[in-house]
Image (cartoon, rainbow, N blue to C red):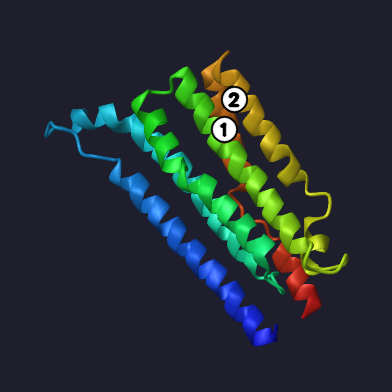
């Protein structure tokens, strides 16, 4: 496969993924239906839905941002990478369902646990996507160097598992863990950018 073909395939993966991200966000915002009343006080009933939407929106933007940087390291796309990317998009596409249920339930136990699960699986899928890309490269590739010990990548699934457990014990802790997870990643992962600049 020539360099132009590599670039074309990489661009196709990122373009398709960007479209999926846009559709997911659109579906989520369509769940925010206006109240039946016409007073400011009527909006108070929507705050659980809005907060769940805001949290999921932040998570999606984090994934979109880091996915962009990840695709910049993709040199030799293959079927395994494409399936790993599709696996990530599968779990992210289920986030609107979990977000809507969490907001409508006002944070009930099972919807909170499901939301934690729908945060856990994309984290696992993103890890697998990283590994599949590294598998197409040399041991000292840009991505392998950038990931390193990957502290944030390893602690994120643990926080999701804890959020699922606490959903059955003390849901408020789950919400704090979700917020903490978002804050952990809200600053885009610049490790890949630094390694790319070193190589130029």
Q: Quadrant of the C terminus?
A: bottom right
Q: Which residue, as the protein is rendered here, is positioned at the far top?
A: 169
Q: Which of 186 and 169 is in front in this view?
A: 169
Residue at 52 percent of width and 20 percent of height: 172
Q: Which of 105 and 62 is in front in this view?
A: 105
Up-down: is 10 above or below 91?
Answer: below
Up-down: is 149 above or below 10?
Answer: above
Q: Under tag 2, what secondary structure?
A: helix
Quarter assignment of residue 135: bottom right
Locate residue 51, reporting x and y percent. Answer: 40, 35
Residue at 57 percent of width and 42 percent of height: 182
Q: Which residue, as the protein is rendered here, is positioned at the far left?
A: 38
Q: Can I make out residue 83 in this image?
A: yes
Query: What residue sits right under mark 2 in the picture?
Result: 164
Locate residue 7, reporting x and y percent. Answer: 62, 80
Question: Is 196 situated left or right of 83 in this image?
Answer: right
Q: Which residue, as the protein is rendered here, is positioned at the far front?
A: 79
Residue at 59 percent of width and 64 percent of height: 68
Question: Is 46 situated left or right of 157 in this image?
Answer: left
Q: Under tag 1, what secondary structure?
A: helix
Locate residue 48, reporting x and y percent. Answer: 36, 29
Quarter assignment of residue 156: top right
Query: What residue sits right under mark 1 in the picture?
Result: 117
Quarter assignment of residue 181: top right
Up-down: is 88 above or below 120?
Answer: below
**Mark with earlier residue (2, 1):** 1
- The reply to whether callout 2 and callout 1 are in contact (CB within 8 Å) is yes
- Report crowding for label 2: few under 14, some 14 to 19, many 20 or more residues within 10 A (C-alpha): many
Residue at 50 percent of width and 50 percent of height: 60
Up-down: is 26 above or below 8?
Answer: above
Alpha carbon distance from label 2 to label 1? 7 Å
Q: Can I make out residue 66 in this image?
A: no
């Amino acid at each position: 496969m020539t360099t132009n073909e590599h670039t074309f395939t990489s661009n196709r993966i990122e373009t398709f993924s960007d479209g999926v991200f846009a559709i997911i966000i659109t579906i989520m915002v369509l769940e925010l239906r206006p109240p039946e009343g016409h007073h400011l006080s009527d909006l108070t009933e929507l705050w659980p839905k809005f907060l769940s939407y805001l949290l999921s929106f932040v998570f999606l933007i984090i994934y979109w941002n880091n996915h962009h940087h990840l695709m910049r390291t993709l040199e030799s796309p293959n079927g395994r990478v494409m399936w790993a990317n599709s696996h990530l998009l599968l779990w992210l596409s289920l986030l609107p369902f979990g977000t809507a249920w969490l907001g409508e339930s006002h944070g009930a136990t099972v919807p909170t646990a499901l939301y934690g699960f729908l945060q856990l699986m994309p984290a696992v899928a993103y890890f697998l996507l990283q590994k599949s890309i590294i598998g197409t490269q040399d041991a000292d590739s840009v991505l392998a160097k950038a990931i390193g010990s990957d502290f944030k990548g390893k602690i994120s699934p643990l926080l999701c598992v804890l959020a699922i457990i606490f959903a059955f014990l003390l849901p408020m802790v789950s919400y704090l863990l979700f917020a903490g997870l978002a804050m952990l990643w809200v600053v885009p992962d610049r490790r890949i950018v630094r390694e790319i600049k070193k190589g130029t």
